[in-house]
Image (cartoon, grey):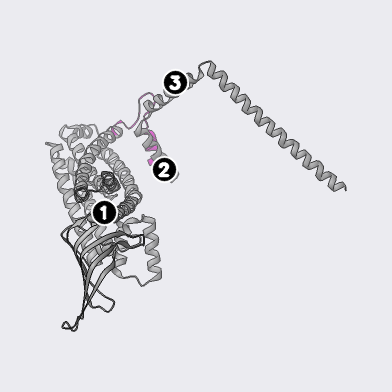
């Protein structure tokens, strides 16, 4: 009985406490409401808005991008126990008095970043226009909505950005440093007792920052763009057969061939389909008129309802004998692999570097994967790193080239040399990927070979510059 009485007392005590707490909360809310009404009467609303605007304006006005970058770099260096680099970036801050110990570093960073932006716009527009010509031209003429075409181009932007950043680093840095050499600013630095290291530090720091940002775009945004692009393009194909079934054309993949006549809306005329049946016999399906239907099944792009069709089946070993079938209607499933090279599932290009690493590790553990498939996954994995961090290698090469060959007309010389090297780098990279994909060998060395050549050349010319 005593225990029951104590339990009742405790429960009533807790209930009283909860009621008191609820009452306190209600009183606080009422006080806040009365305070808000009082402030509103005094014109406090305008005061709050004006104070907020003033705070934002001051924050934006006082914000310094280089200070923010140096502060983050200093924190990272101290975090990993790198005391000397941490102190260097710490003293590179712009103080409130306007004084800082590394005026030259800040000046060079600003100039390099400005020229990088100008070069990036140039390369971005070049690749962007090329992308428009590849995507929009073939799709717009098939009366696809402009909204879908714009979305396709939007999903292609990560590819354009990842391609533009390394080349913009090379050309921008060459033009900037070439201008400094032409206007004798480098000569003044050397005459004042400064070493080339004072120029090398901002070049490498900015090159590393560009590489990191480019890696994020290449590793995260690029696969996301590929996935959305493929999804939208498939929707366009199923909703508008003329995009896939191009009028008066021939589609060939593996052992299948599709000969297409006229296409109007969802009607196709004079359709001929060549393939092999389950017994490896040659099969030809001919239909005068066909209707295209959408399919919700995975892997099936569309269904063709072939009216008044004829099927001819030939024995490969005995071509004299053949079978002919006639039907009022035949339902033919057109798979995605028939009109595209998609193999289904998630392709290596649609994975992040972490996903690719885990996939390669699982494939090696399970075994049974062909060398060609393994090479393709390894190629795409190392491509995630080699292309973005190519900006760092280009930055290392730009410094000695600009100072060695940019004494006269440095900007023009830098632009010409940069474009020539960019075209050569791009050609070697593309040809190497094609060769590796078809042969199934050398994915890793082929992806890093251009960067290795650029890096070795950069070190060679830098040592030559120091000795000179």
Pick whichever of labels 1 and 2 is earlier in the sequence: 2
Q: Is residue 254 visible?
A: no
Q: Secondary structure at mark 1?
A: loop
* Region rendered in magenta: 83-104
Q: Which residue is mark 1?
A: 240
Q: Which residue is mark 2?
A: 76
Q: Which residue is mark 3?
A: 50
For the residues marked 1 and 2, what is the alpha-carbon distance in whole angstroms?
A: 53 Å
Q: Residues within 10 Å of mark 3 (few under 14, many from 20)?
A: few
Residue contact at pointers 3 and 1, CB within 8 angstroms:
no
Q: Quadrant of residue 447?
A: bottom left
- Of residues 20 and 217, which is closer to you in this image? 20
Q: Where in the figure is residue 170, as x and y percent of width and height?
A: 22, 44
Tell whether 78 sits left or right of 266: right
Above or below 405: residue 34? above
Q: Where in the figure is residue 158, as x and y percent of width and height?
A: 29, 47
Residue contact at pointers 2 and 3, CB within 8 angstroms:
no
Instruction: Check if residue 282 falls in the magenta segment.
Output: no
């Amino acid at each position: 009985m005593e225990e029951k009485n104590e339990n009742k007392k405790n429960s009533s005590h807790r209930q009283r406490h909860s009621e008191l707490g609820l009452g306190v909360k209600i009183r606080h809310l009422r006080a806040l409401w009365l305070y808000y009404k009082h402030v509103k009467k005094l014109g406090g609303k305008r005061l709050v808005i004006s104070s907020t605007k003033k705070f934002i304006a001051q924050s934006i006005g006082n914000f310094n991008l280089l200070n923010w970058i140096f502060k983050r770099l200093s924190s990272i260096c101290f975090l990993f126990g790198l005391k000397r680099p941490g102190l260097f970036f710490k003293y590179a801050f712009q103080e409130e008095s306007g004084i800082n110990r590394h005026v030259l570093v800040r000046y060079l960073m600003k100039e390099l970043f400005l020229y990088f932006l100008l070069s990036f716009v140039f390369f971005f527009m070049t690749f962007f226009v090329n992308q428009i010509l590849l995507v929009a031209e073939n799709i717009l003429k098939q009366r696809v909505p402009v909204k879908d075409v714009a979305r396709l181009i939007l999903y292609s932007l990560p590819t354009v950005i990842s391609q533009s950043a390394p080349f913009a680093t090379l050309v921008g840095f060459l033009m900037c440093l070439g201008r400094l050499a032409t206007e004798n600013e480098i000569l003044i630095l050397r005459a004042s007792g400064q070493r080339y290291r004072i120029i090398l530090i901002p070049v490498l720091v900015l090159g590393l920052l560009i590489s990191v940002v480019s890696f994020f775009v290449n590793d995260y945004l690029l696969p996301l763009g590929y996935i959305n692009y493929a999804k939208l393009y498939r929707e366009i194909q199923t909703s508008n057969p003329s995009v896939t079934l191009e009028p008066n054309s021939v589609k060939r993949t593996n052992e299948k061939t599709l000969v297409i006549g006229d296409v109007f809306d969802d009607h196709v005329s004079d359709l001929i389909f060549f393939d092999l049946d389950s017994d490896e016999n040659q099969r030809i399906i001919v239909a005068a008129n066909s209707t295209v239907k959408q399919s919700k099944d995975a892997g099936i792009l569309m269904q063709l309802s072939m009216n008044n069709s004829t099927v001819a089946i030939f024995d490969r070993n005995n071509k004299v004998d053949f079978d002919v079938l006639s039907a009022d209607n035949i339902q033919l499933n057109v798979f995605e692999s028939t009109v595209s090279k998609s193999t289904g599932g998630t392709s290596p290009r649609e994975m992040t570097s972490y996903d690719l690493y885990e996939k390669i590790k699982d494939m090696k553990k399970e075994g049974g994967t062909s060398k060609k498939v393994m090479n393709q996954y390894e190629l795409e994995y190392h491509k995630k790193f080699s292309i973005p961090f190519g900006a760092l290698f280009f930055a290392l090469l730009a410094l000695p080239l600009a100072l060695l060959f940019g004494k006269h007309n440095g900007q023009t010389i830098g632009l010409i040399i940069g474009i020539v090297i960019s075209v050569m780098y791009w050609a070697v990279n593309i040809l190497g990927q094609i060769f590796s994909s078809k042969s199934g060998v050398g994915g890793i060395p082929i992806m890093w070979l251009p960067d290795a050549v650029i890096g070795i050349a950069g070190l060679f010319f830098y040592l030559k510059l120091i000795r000179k």
